[in-house]
Amino acid sequence: MSDTPGQLQSVSVEVRGLRKSFGSLEVLKGVTFKVNPGEIFVIMGPSGSGKSVLLRHIIGLETPDAGEILIQGEAAEGARMRDKYRMAMVFQSAALLTSLSVGENVGLYLTEHSLKTPEEIAAIVARKLEAVGLKGLEDRVPSELSGGMQKRVAIARALVMEPQLFLFDEPTAELDPPMAVTIDEEILKLKDRTHATSIVVTHDRILAFSLADRVAMFIDGQVLFIGTPDEVKLHPDPRVQEFINAKPPTSRSSLTL
Amino acid sequence: MFQHIGEIIVLFWRTLQALPLCWRQRRKIFEQLFEIGNVSLLMVCILSLFIAGVTALQTGPVMVEHGLGTFVGGSIGLAVCKEFAPVFMAILIAGRIGSAMAAEIGSMRVYQEIDALRTMNIDPVNYLVLPRMVAIAMALPALVMFAIPVGWFGGAMISALNPRIGINFTSFFQSLRDEVDSGDVFNGIFKSFIFALAIGLVSCHQGLSTRGGPRGIGRSVTKAVVNSIVLILILDYFLTRILLYIQK
């Protein structure tokens, strides 16, 4: 059952020649790719390569210096784009409003847009929290939750919007491996449940290969290669191989100070 | 500087446009009103009492010495309602509430809470700025209305208790009634309303412009308080000129 009005339809996203500089630092150097409706598209690359800035452009939080973003083939920017298509972003830091309770955070979109009565919102919030395994935590405040629980609340908050496009910024960053697996499962469940298009930004190879329909290798502000996880693993470019095959040091003695 | 002034004007305009949403934001407005009133009322009373007391202490003996004892109540009454109450209460609110506004909005900005609001199509001006602006614009004039009689009482008390002044309550308030009329009180309340808008706008703008981590929040808070106080004093001069011209 849909909790918010409107017909759900997953959307395509096309990024064409996107460029962005902050001062003299060029972060995005002509990024181009297309995400098909309903697919999980993972943008993988090392930290500091501009992945999060790219995501912020897609949802309209940044204005590009050049290039354009097309949603369902239509060029649009910022709030206008978010008016037309329901998009939700799960931030790396979860970005829950610390002055609100968990329940108020999850129901914020419905409350502020007066889309439902308080009773209906409470019921929807309970359902969404249950869906992410946090049943009954409505009255807690975000500071009482662990990092993984905060991420799941952020996913519940995004779910309430019934988005056509989900954006995840480093969903498993700073989480322990079991919690990372849980988040991974949540994202896969979302695909089954909502059929929404998902764009996931991560430097976590395990997450990328387990989730993705397609993976974009993003290095130094540019898309180097787009393919299925298997194609990425076999790609001959040394930078791709270096990133996906990098191993942690085996002993303390291998660390140089 | 000119960029900041332009941004503040735009913020003010967007807040005015959001005014029809006041009813929807009534809970947040009430929370802010309670926050401002609750934390400030006692301080307002203490400040007003002592400022008027010190004024009486400094001016009273000189006036009495020169045979102007009958004007002590009137001069203190005018000074309190037209200048001391609005200006000092505004400075107090800039320090207590302006800093809190800049810190809260600044921390929401730094920790991406404002970005999260925008992704949900919730305008930060409607959600964060409007309730604070409406609340401070209501609360500061109300606090000044409180501060004025408390200040008068402080002046009267010192005038009665200090042997070098020796003016009793009846004479003090008789002089005050002769010199101060409702227009003078309205003058001070109007000034405080303008100061409240200035504090709210400067503090919210600083919060929304915060960059960097905790150090950035600290910088925003300092700028919000300092800029608010400077703006209050500059506005006070021009408002006084305008109001004196109108009263003629």
Image (tube, rainbow, N blue to C red):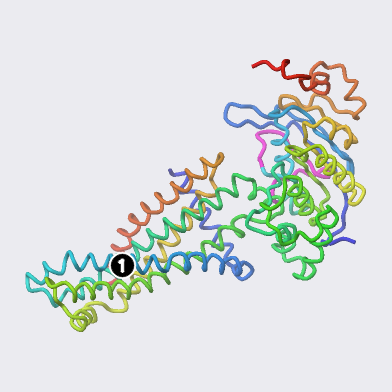
In the picture, residue A181 is in which quadrant? Answer: top right
For badge 1, the amino acid type reads Leu
Q: Of A90 and B154, which appears nearest the observer? A: B154
Q: Where is residue A112 in the image (x, y as percent from the top left)?
A: 69, 62
Q: Mark 1 points at which residue?
A: B243
Q: Tell me: B164 left or right of A91.
A: left
Q: Percent from the top left, x then y, of residue A81?
A: 74, 49
Residue at figure coordinates x 36%, y 57% from the top left: B232
Q: Is residue B196 left or right of residue A126?
A: left
Nearest the viewer among A57 and A1 is A1
In this rendering, would B30 be left or right of A27?
left
Q: Mark 1 lies on which chain?
A: B
Of residue A191 and residue A32, the one placed in the foreground of this image is A191
User: What range is drawn magenta here?
Assistant: A62-79
Indicate left or right for A89 with B172 as reference.
right
Secondary element at image label 1: helix
Which residue occupies 23% across, 65% down?
A: B54
Toward the viewer: B139 or A140?
A140
